[in-house]
Amino acid sequence: MKNDNLKKVDSDEIYDCIIIGGGAAGSACAALLSKWGFKVILIEKRGHLGGRASTLKTNLGYKIDTGVHGIPYYDIGSLKKIEKELEIQFDLIDYSPLLAFYDVEEKICVEVNEFNNSFFKEINRIWSPNNEFLHLLNFLHNATEDDAEKLDNTTVKDFIQQFSPTHQFYQLIRAINGMITIEPHLGSAGEFIRSFSKLFSSKRPITYPKNGGIQSLSEIFGEICRENGGEILLLNKVTEILIDNNKVIGVKCENKVKDDSQEIFDIYSHSVIVTIPLQNLFSIISKGFFSENFVNKVDSLKDMQSCAQGIAFTFKKELLNDFPWDPKCWGAIIFQPGKKPRYLSVPSALVDNITPPGMHYMFYGIVATPEELKDKKGSRARLKELKREIYQMFPRLKELKQWQFEGSSEMVLGTAKRVGMTGNYKPGNKNNEIDGLFFAGDTVGGNGPGLECTFDSALKCSKLVLNWINNNYKKLNDKLKN
């Protein structure tokens, strides 16, 4: 993508919309609004698009996503709808199998090729012999949005008690719920229903780009924006949203130029879309502009995040022969006796252009709570335990690995589907106190796991902006032209 970070913005120019943040949501909004004929400019503080859905390119030839990403229920999800609006089609893979379940102690492995009752019968037989899991699946297949809304303030742990109170069933649901990176005693049952009812009804439950890693989606959106006359400013940071009489008039930017000095300038527009995590909103606009209810909703997002902890390895392809399941799946849920479920993914097994020839990489980790990660001693012990487990499962890893790294994500902003923070409890996509201010991204209006939540929010927000600009400015401009 062309680097526009040193572009000079005409101070007399007025845009239809400024988009703050070039992650998956911001780049999707930029592509949609520019395609619909609006004059947009996207501002991103990094030197590339993608945000938290970025792909790191190492000097050894690896393309490693910042996290284990997938595109949920693509055939019935928001990305498909965005494609139709943009008149494009992404080049995506199909995982086969989709998912694997592996019991280390019993050496039992079950591969799931489709998310439906027939393929889950073996899971049900092994991990819920009284058919609790099939009963839950039947409920999810018939669940409605009303069912979800009633349970937004109920934990997943409490919700599943109606199906079975046993620890074995809890561990199974804990493993599945971990796909949206939160523990059942913290997670919202409403969002569990929204996410998994669609996941289990989809013909393409999980997919992924064939080329370039997850960041390639944002890069394609960026190109569409530019092709339709939109602008992208990289390495520019919005420091303030400019307001006049409770109406958006633009933003103040900071651009770092060659000698590390800074250039401050204003960009003017009729509307602004904020796509940075809403936890950071009040760093660029005063709380005083907003109602107490809105401020409380934003403040409730602080320190309530989903977390993950794990270890990654790069290794020679010979190790793929040692996997008890087909490593070309999206990931494996691994049950260790007396422990939390583990998650193992080998993205390069199916997408072979993201590693050097003959090499692969894997992630092995667990879902954690914020409190667990604050315990540094406990965190070190868990990482040591994970390392020991992975070597026990794959003894040849020690000789076949190239390098490894370990760590934890203490703030996966927005992906937490925490009880009381989903559905109508989330801040919406349009602000009612400030005219022309909109929000997109996984911390605001939008449902679904991971990137589905992001794209759902981006599409909803873009349509609101479309209608708002048409009602407030386009009709007036047309009259002036005539």
Image (spheres, grey):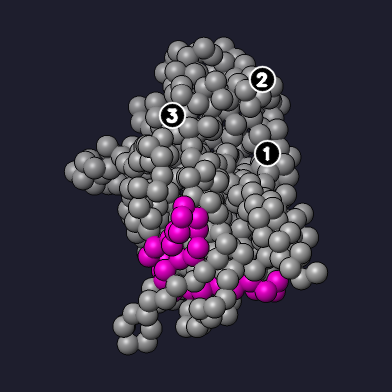
Tell me the residue at 35%/47% (across/down): 288
Residue under label 3: 419
Is 62 situated left or right of 195 in this image?
left
User: Which region shows up in magenta?
Assistant: 226-253
The main secondary structure of the magenta stretch is: strand
Decide: is 376 above or below 276.
Answer: above
Tell me the residue at 37%/87% (across/down): 258
Tell me the residue at 57%/16% (across/down): 132
Circle 3 packing at 10 Å, graded few (<14), some (14-19), many (20+), is: many
Depth check: 91 or 380 in front?
A: 91
Percent across and percent down for residue 198 are 66, 34
Residue under label 1: 113
Circle 3 — which element? loop
Decide: is 422 above or below 286.
Answer: above
Residue 86 in view, yes or no: yes
Quarter holding the C terminus is bottom right
Tell me the residue at 62%/16% (across/down): 135
Residue 138 badge: 2
